[in-house]
Image (cartoon, rainbow, N blue to C red):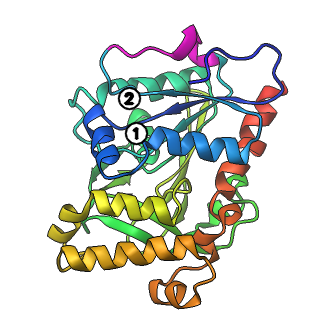
């Protein structure tokens, strides 16, 4: 973590909320994957050069904000994904995260996040999330389209009306809270992006993962291989290993047209500027204007 906020800084100071439990983070590390918090730190530092980033793990017992910084002193909160399940609201790993999101709304800290953020943000504002009736959505979410509200929303300035994105989730928001608008959807998951205004606070969140690249998706699939075999994404371990190797090979050499064609992958996920446009829009359209007040 970077410590306390810099005095009179003109660059944003972010708090990244890593939604994983300690056990979940250790599982990622064992499979050669970085923690979700570090992935988000890397993305924010790339999109917003000069920013400072603290990371917090609210599922860990006794955790407090870094360096004594008050929540309202942050210019933005960025929520990662998680392997937890928000509809198990009595889970001691989940309760403090719901409370943190509620506090972010109350203190009106501009918030953004992936996957878990949609779910925890909706539940904290009075919505509902359940186990996805279609099962897990994994790998590449196909044909995400902007709703009528999404087409005119600042989160999606410059984004194609239809796009693919990296994704990995088991749950789905079924009931949006008051003050929420669905910005994007696809045939598999109705709420692929949401804007929530609650108690004066604002969250823009996407069900997919702009922080991933092909390598990170490959590492995640490696960590989840047995689960994915059980869900019939792969026939067996060899089948999974072949697919993962193709992802890694395309990441190492993006000019491999053969692999891109076989995997059905294009600039939506290969081009970092396209993939992370929503993050840049959040910073430029919501975070920086708030800082200038």
Neighbor class of circle 1 (other Cα within 10 Å; few <14, some 14-19, many 20+) is: many
Magenta stretch holds residue 67: yes
Q: Which residues are magenta?
A: 62-72
Q: Look at 50% across and 86% down and name the residue there.
A: 259
For disc 1, the marked residue is 120
Where is residue 167 shown, x and y percent of the image? 43, 62
Residue at 23% x, 67% y: name it: 228
Q: Quadrant of the C terminus?
A: top right
Q: Where is residue 44? Give x, y as percent.
A: 65, 42
- In the image, 98 versus 233, the foreground residue is 233
Label 1 residue SS: helix
Report if the CB atoms under discs 1 and 2 are less than 8 Å apart. yes
- Distance from the alpha carbon under mark 1 to that under mark 2: 8 Å
Asked whether 86 or 267 is in front, the reply is 267
Quadrant for residue 4, please give it.
top right
Q: Is residue 114 above or below residue 19?
A: below
The residue labelled by disc 2 is 97
Observer able to see residue 246:
yes
152 versus 83 height, above or below: below
Earlier residue among tags 1 and 2? 2
Describe the element under mark 2 as helix, strand or loop: helix
Between 208 and 181, the one nearer to me in the picture: 208
Across and down, in percent, residue 130 comes to 26, 51
Q: Quadrant of residue 105?
A: top right
Q: Is residue 226 left or right of residue 76?
A: left
Quadrant location of residue 112? top right
């Amino acid at each position: 973590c970077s410590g306390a906020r810099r005095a009179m800084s003109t660059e944003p100071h972010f708090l990244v909320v890593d939604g994983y439990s300690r056990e979940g983070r250790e599982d990622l590390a064992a499979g050669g994957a970085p923690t979700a918090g570090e992935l988000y730190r890397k993305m924010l530092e790339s999109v917003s050069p000069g920013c400072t980033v603290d990371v917090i793990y609210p599922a860990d017992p006794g955790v407090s904000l870094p360096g004594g910084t008050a929540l309202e002193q942050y210019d933005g909160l960025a929520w990662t994904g998680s392997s937890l399940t928000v509809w198990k609201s009595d889970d001691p790993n989940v309760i403090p995260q719901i409370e943190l999101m509620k506090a972010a709304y109350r203190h009106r800290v501009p918030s953004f996040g992936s996957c878990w953020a949609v779910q925890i943000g909706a539940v904290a504002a009075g919505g509902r999330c359940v186990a996805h009736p279609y099962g897990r959505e994994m790998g590449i979410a196909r044909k995400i389209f902007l709703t009528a509200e999404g087409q005119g929303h600042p989160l999606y300035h410059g984004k194609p009306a239809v796009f693919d994105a990296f994704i990995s989730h088991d749950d789905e928001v079924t009931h949006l809270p008051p003050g929420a608008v669905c910005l994007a959807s696809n045939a598999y998951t109705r709420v692929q992006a949401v804007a929530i205004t609650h108690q004066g606070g604002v969250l823009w969140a996407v069900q997919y993962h702009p922080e991933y690249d092909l390598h990170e998706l490959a590492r995640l699939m490696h960590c989840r291989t047995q689960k994915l075999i059980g869900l019939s994404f792969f026939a067996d371990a060899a089948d999974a290993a072949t697919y993962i190797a193709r992802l890694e090979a395309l990441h190492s050499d993006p000019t491999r047209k053969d692999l891109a064609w076989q995997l059905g992958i294009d600039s939506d996920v290969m081009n970092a500027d396209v993939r992370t446009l929503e993050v840049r829009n959040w910073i430029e359209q919501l975070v920086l204007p708030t800082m200038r007040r």
